[in-house]
Amino acid sequence: MTLAKMVPARRPAPIDPEAQPGSGGAPGEGGSGSAGHRRPGYGPLGQDDLERIHQSALTVLETVGFANPIPSCVEVLTRAGAVHGQDRRIRFPRALVADTLARAGRHFTLHGQDPRHDMIVQDGHVRYGTAGLAVHLVDAETRSYRESQLRDIYDAARIVEGLDNIHFFQRPMAARDIADPLELDLNTLYACVMGTSKHIGTSFTVRENVRPALEMLYALAGGEAKFRARPFVSSSTPFVVSPMKFAEDACGVLEECVKGGIPILLLSTAQTGTTAPASLVGAVVQAVAEVLAGLVYVNALKPGHPAMLGTWPFASHPGSGIMAGGSAEQALLTAACAQMARFYDLPGASAAGMTGSKQPDFQSGYEKGITNVLAGLSGLDLVYEAAGMHASLLGFCLESLIIDDAVLGHCLRCQRGLDASEAARSVDAIAATCMNGPGHYLDNGPGSPAPAAAYFDAGAIERLSPKQWCEAGKPDMLHQAIDARKKILAERFPRHVAKAVDDRLRARFGDLIRLPRSAMGYSER
Amino acid sequence: MTLAKMVPARRPAPIDPEAQPGSGGAPGEGGSGSAGHRRPGYGPLGQDDLERIHQSALTVLETVGFANPIPSCVEVLTRAGAVHGQDRRIRFPRALVADTLARAGRHFTLHGQDPRHDMIVQDGHVRYGTAGLAVHLVDAETRSYRESQLRDIYDAARIVEGLDNIHFFQRPMAARDIADPLELDLNTLYACVMGTSKHIGTSFTVRENVRPALEMLYALAGGEAKFRARPFVSSSTPFVVSPMKFAEDACGVLEECVKGGIPILLLSTAQTGTTAPASLVGAVVQAVAEVLAGLVYVNALKPGHPAMLGTWPFASHPGSGIMAGGSAEQALLTAACAQMARFYDLPGASAAGMTGSKQPDFQSGYEKGITNVLAGLSGLDLVYEAAGMHASLLGFCLESLIIDDAVLGHCLRCQRGLDASEAARSVDAIAATCMNGPGHYLDNGPGSPAPAAAYFDAGAIERLSPKQWCEAGKPDMLHQAIDARKKILAERFPRHVAKAVDDRLRARFGDLIRLPRSAMGYSER
C-alpha cells in the first residue's frame, strides 16, 4: 500500500508570461522551463476577442455600474472618480478603470507559513488549490454524505500539506457544527493554519470578525509587521451579488482585510442563465466587469494592494439552472477567464476541477481531468476548486484530494510540454540502434523523463497485467486513496506552528477554539 | 433509466484547416463553425519544431532507411527511386519523400455503409473511434476479465452504431475463439460490417486473406465498382516493426489492399525507451519517418491511394518498459503527431483515450479525458483508441464505450469553442437585466446552447441534490451504462445489411461464418 507522499511540494513548471496561448515553442522537457523558450498553451479566445470583451466590460461598468454600495464604498469610490448616480448606482468611468489596471498589484507573493510554499503570482507557474464552500463531507468508503464539520477542514488541510500538486489550501467546507459567525470564522481559520503550512484562503462573515482573525494571524506570524511582510492567508471575498450589486457584508470584510494586510481574492460567482447571461462569453463579460469594479475598490482603498481576479462564472444546465461544474462549457469559461487575466497582466484566479458527480468515480475523473488540464494550459495563475470537490460544490471528499492530486500531476506534466532540441530528436540514437546496434532502445540511457511525477499509484496498477491485477485483489486508485487517507489522518500532524504559539492562541481565545488538543495529535504528550 | 441514444451520429464541429493551433479566433458557439472563423487549438510544438522534426525524419529515412523489405517491396520502391543498399536496407532520398508528400491522397472520404456516416478526412472535423487489439473483454459488472470472442466484436459494433460521438469503428478485440487466420480475418470483418454502418477499420493477417475479404466487401457493396467508389472498410496495417524494419506479412497485406481498393492506415506503434527512442520527440521523429516510408510505398504502388498517417508512438514507464497509455506523456505524444500531420496537410490518425486502468473508474476517467481532449484540440483528424479500451490496450469494455462517448461529447464541445460576437457579449442583456429588469437572466431566452450534448446521464445525475441522489439509490454513470449495455444488446440489431445479401454471404462462405443467425437477432424470424 502506498501512502500519498508527505514531502514538500515541488515547484510547478513555469509558463512564460510573454507567450500567448498556442504561440508554439519548445520548453525543456520535464525540466523547470528554460529562459527564452516560448511555452505553447491553449485559449479558446483570440486576441481580438479579448480586446472586445474588455471593451464590453468597460461599457458595462460605465453604463450599468453597481447597485447597493455601502456608505464607505460610496465614499472611497467617488473620491477615486466613480460616479454615484441618482439611481444610487456606482458607475466607473473608463479612465478610472484604466488607471486602476495600470497601477494594480501584479507580481506579489502569496506566502506560505513555510517559505517553501511561497507562490509568486504571475511568475509563469500554474498553481492548483482547493476552494469551497461545500456543506457536506463525502465519504468515499461508504459512498455517503454527511454534514461537514470543523474537524474535516483540519483533516483536509493535513492531507493537502503532503500532496505535491496541490499548491495552496482554501477552506473547502463549512464547519456546520459551529453556528456563531465569529466562532465559525475563527475556528475555520485556526483549522487551516494549524493543518497546513501552504498558503491559505479563507473568508469572513462580517467586517467585525476580521480584527480578531488578524490578531490570530499576527500572533502566528510573530507580530503584525511580520504578517504584513509575509501574508500567508488571503481572503476569498464575494463582494458582489451578481448581477452587478455590491454585497454589503463582504464589502465591509474587504475594507477591513485591505486595512489589515490580507490579500484579496475578488470573487464573482454567477451562473449562466440565472445570475449571469446565458451566453458563455456574456458571462465572462459580466464576471470581468464585476471583478474590475472590485479591483478599483481595492486600489482606491490602498493602491497596489494584492488582489486576484476571481472571475468564476459557472456553467449551468439550461432550464433547471443547476450548476454544471464539470461540463465542457465550464472548461471553456475558465480558460476564457484565464486569457482575460493574462490580457490584463494581472493574477487570474478561477475555478476548475469541479464535477457534478457525487462520488470519486469515472465521471469525476474525466470532468476534473478535462477542466483542470485546460485551466492549466490556458495559463491560469491560480486554479481554485481543483481538488476534492463534488456535486458541483456541495460535497467535499478527502479521498478525492489524494486522487485528484494525481490528475493535477498529469496537468502539470502537460504544461511542461516537449523538448524538440537536436538531442531530443534522437537521429543519432535511431541510426546507432538500427544499423549496428541492438535494434531496441532499452540501453539508451535517459532522454525521456519519468512519466508524470504524480502518478500516485496509477503507475503501480498499470504495471500489473490483468492476471496480476486479479491476483492482487483488483486494486484501484480510489481504494488505495481510502487507505492512504486513513493512514495520513492517523499519523500526520503538521508541526509548523510551535506549541508555544498554539498555547498563546489558546490562552488568548480560550473556549473560542473548538479543535481540542487531542484532535491535533497532541494527546500522547 | 436512460438508454444511450440510438440515433445517427451528428457531425462534429469542423476545425478550420487554415488555423494553426492556438492561433485564436471565435468559432460559432455550439454551432457547426462558420467560414472565416479561426478555430483556436492546442499544440505542444512550435512551427519551427515541426520543420525540425520533419528534417530529422528525412535524415533518418535517407541515412538509416528500412531493413527487411520483401522482394515486391524492393521492386516497387527502387523503381520509385529508393535505394537498395549493400546492407539490404531500403533508403529514401529526400526528393522521393518530397515528391510523395506533394502527390499523396489528402482529402478522400472514409465511407460508411450508411452515407450519413461518411467522413471526409481533413475537412476540419475531429473524429473519434475505437481501435484494438485487446485480447480480453472487461466485464464492468463483475470487474473481471475474460478472453475476448467474436461475439464481443459484433456487440461492440452494435453499441457504437448508436453512440453519437464515436464516429468510426475499428475492430477493438481479437476473436480468441477462432484460431485459423483466414477464419479470424473473415469473421472479424463480418462481425464489424454486420454490427455497424459506420466506417470500419480491420486488419488482415496475411496477404492471402485479403482476396476473400474483398469478395465479401464487394458483395456487401453490390459489386467491386461500388465498393471502390465508396470503400467503407480501411485496413489497419502495421507494415513496420519498429525501429525501421518492414513487417513481411503486413507488407503483403498492404500491397493487396491497395490493389483491391481498401484505404490504408499506415501504422507505426513503437514504445518510448524500447522500440522507440526514450525521448518523446525522438519517438515522434521515428514514427514520422516510419509512416512516411509507408506513404512512399503506398504511393509507389498507386499514386494518391487513400492512406492515413498512423503515427502511434506509445509512452511507457521508464525501466519496466510497460505501456503508459493514459499518461500525460501520451497526451503530448499524440498532440505532437497531430501537429505533424497538419504540417504535412495529410490525414492524421493517432491514438488517445487509452488508460492503464483495468476498469472504468476514476483513473480511466481522467486519463481518457485529458488525452482525448488534447487530441481533439490539436486537430487530429482521426482519434483511434478513443473509447472502450483499458489496461493499456489489453482489455476492452462494452460499458466503457457508452461512458467514454460522454467524454468525447465534452471533447467535441471544447473544440467548438466560444462565440465572442457582439450579441454573445450580452452588454445589452446585462444592462436590461440590471437596471430596469428582474435582476436575473432566467427569462433571457437562448444565447447559451445546452451543455455538451453527450452528457449521457451525467446531467441527470447532476441535477439531483445529494439528498435526492441518496434517495434515488446513488446512481452513477457506470451502473447506468451497465443497464444500457444490457438493453442495447438485447434489443438493437442493426439491419443495414439486407437479409438477401447476408444470405448470399452465408451461401458463399458457408461454415466459415461463425456468428450464427440466432446471435444476430434473427431468431424470431
Image (cartoon, coloured by chain):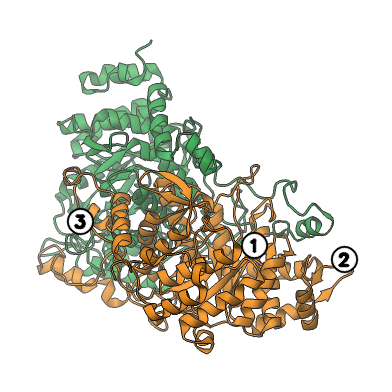
Chain colours: A green, B orange
Q: Position of residue A360 (x, y in %)?
A: 34, 43
- Give the letter of the chain under mark 3: A
Residue beneath disc 1: B284
Q: Which residue is mark 3?
A: A322
Task: Give the alpha-carbon distance from disc 2 to disc 1, as whole Å.
Answer: 26 Å
Taking the image as shown, residue B70 lies to the left or right of residue B171, namely right
Q: Are marks 1 and 3 on the same chain?
A: no
Name the disc covering residue A342, or none.
Answer: none
Tag nearer the camera, 1 or 3: 1
The amino acid at mark 3 is Ile
- Residue B237, position in %: x, y? 62, 68
Residue bearing the label numbered 2? B87
SS for tag 2? loop
**Amino acid identity at mark 1:** Val
The quadrant in which the C terminus of chain A is found is top left
Residue A320 point in image, percent of width and height: 17, 60
Q: Hey, which residue is sitting farthest top in the picture? A: A525
The residues tagged by marks 3 and 2 sit, at their Cα atoms, a distance apart of 68 Å
Query: Relative to B164, is B500 above or below?
Result: below
- Residue at position x 59%, y 48% in the image: A32
Residue extending farthest to the right is B86
* Tag 1 secondary structure: helix
Q: Residue at x 36, y 36 (%)?
A: A399
Measure the alpha-carbon separation of dots 1 and 3. 44 Å
| Badge 2 or badge 1: first in the primary sequence | 2
The chain under label 2 reads B
| Residue B468 horizontal/vertical position (percent) | 16, 46
Seen in the image, is B273 located left or right of residue B200? Answer: right
